[in-house]
Image: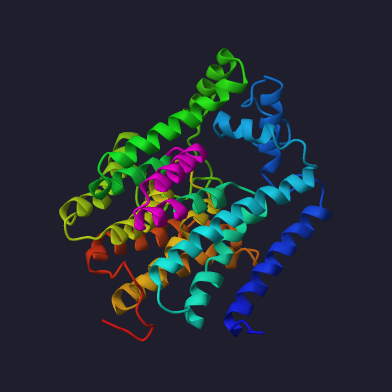
Amino acid sequence: MTRWPLMVRVVFTLWLIACLGIVGRLCIQDEGRGSVVPIYRAGGERWAAMEDCYRHVPGLDFFRNPPGIALLFSHLTWLPDRLEEVFWRAAGLCLLIVGTKMWVDRLIPDRPPTAWEWAILGILPLPVILASLNNGQMNIHLAGAVLIATAAFADRRIGLTALWISIAIAFKIYPVVLLGLLLPRSGYRLPLRALLLAALTALVPYLVQDAAYVSDQYSTWWNCLAVDDRHHTNLNRASRDFYLICRVWFQEPDPSTYKAIQAVAGLLLVLPTLVYRREWTVPKLAARTLIGGSLWMVLFGPATESSTYTLIAVPMSLLLLIGRRSRVDLAIIVVAWSLLLLPALAMMFPFGKAIQGYAPQPLGALLAFGVVVVRGSRLSWEAVADASGSE
C-alpha cells in the first residue's frame, strides 16, 4: 500500500483536528453559540411562515442575505439543528476542496506537489479559513464557487463558468466583478449566460411563495444593504476594507470619493486585460481574475469582516506559488501573508482585538493587490515551475 508523503499527512491531520474540534464544539456548547447558522435558520423559518425575514430576532444578528438563502434554509429545517450546522459547513468545505483541486491540477499539471507546495496550499490558508468554518458563514461556499468558476474558465468551459458565477452571485452580489475581468476573452457569451442564470435564480422564490410577499422581501433586503454601512462604527466592528486603512492611517474619504476609489481599483484590474488581451492566454486571464478579483472583493466590496478574508485564502496561496520565482514579488507576498495571519495569531493573547484596529488584514490584501496590478504582466500565471527557480 502506497503511503502518503509526510507533508500530505501533516496537512490532512491538521485539517482533521480543526474539523473535529469544530464538530466537537457544536456538540458540546449551547445550540447556536458562536455560529451564524441560527441567523440563516431563522430567516428560513420566517420565509416558510411568510413573515419578514429581515426583522430583528432578539439574541441574533440581522439576516442580511438574499431571499433565496432564506428559501434554501427553509428546506433544511427537517435536519436537527446541530446536524444542520455540520451539513452546512461540510458543503462549503467540499466546494472549497474541489475548487482548490481544480486549480492545483491547472498550475501543477505534470508532477505531484512538493512538500513546500503542500504546506503553502494546505497549511497556510487554514488560520484564515478557520474563522468562517468555525462560525458557519457562507464565505467558504462563495470562495469555493469562485475557485470552481475561474478554473472552469481556464479550461474554456463557458457553461460551467456561467453556472458557478451565477451561484456566487446568488450568495453575494459583488462576484459580478468577475464577469468584467473575464470579458476581454469571453466575449458577451459568458456575461449573458451568467446574468441570465443569476436572474433565473433570483426568480425561483416567486415559484414557491406569493409574488407580493417575495417582492416585499427583495425590497426590504435591498434597503438593508443600503443602510448597512459599518465604516463609521467602532474599530472592533468596522468593515475590514480599504476604508479602514484610510480611517486608521490617513483620512476618512467622503462617500463619493470612496466610490471613485472603488471604481479606479476596478479599472486597474480591467485595463491590463484589455491592453494584453491578445497576448494573455485564457488560463493566465483566469488566474489573474481569480486572485485580483478576490482581492478587490475583500478590499473594496461591501461589509468586509475578518472572516470575509476566507475569500482570498486559497487565491493568496496560489499567488505565493506563482510569484515565488521573483525575489521582489516573493518578499511582498510573504509580508502580505504575515499581515493576514497576524490577527489570527494575535487573538491568542490579551491584546489580540487591539491589533485589528491597525487594519493588518486590509493592508496585507492591499500589498497583494499591488503585486497583481503592478507586476501582474510579468508573473508566470499558467504553470508553476520547480521551487528552486528564481528570477
Q: In the image, residue 313 lies at what x, y percent?
A: 49, 61
Visual colour scheme = rainbow
**Magenta residues?**
147-173
Can residue 264 be seen here? The reply is yes
- Which residue is located at x 66 percent, y 54 percent? 90
Numbered label tally = 0
Q: Please tell me which residue lies in front, 25 or 236.
A: 25
- Which residue is located at x 22 percent, y 53 percent? 273
- Which residue is located at x 75 percent, y 35 percent? 77
Q: Please tell me which residue lies in front, 296 or 230.
A: 296
Quarter of the rendering containing residue 282: bottom left
- Which residue is located at x 46 percent, y 60 percent? 360
Q: Quadrant of the N terminus?
A: bottom right
Q: In the image, residue 300 lies at what x, y percent?
A: 38, 46
Can residue 242 be seen here? The reply is no
Q: What secondary structure predominates along the stretch shown in magenta?
A: helix
Q: Please tell me which residue lies in front, 354 or 92.
A: 92
Whether the magenta-drawn stretch holds residue 71 is answered as no
Q: Quadrant of the C terminus?
A: bottom left
In this view, which residue lies farthest toward the top? 212
Quarter of the rendering containing residue 263: top left
Q: Please tell me which residue lies in front, 345 or 26.
A: 26
Q: In the image, residue 43 lies at what x, y percent?
A: 66, 31
Left or right for 75, reference 256: right
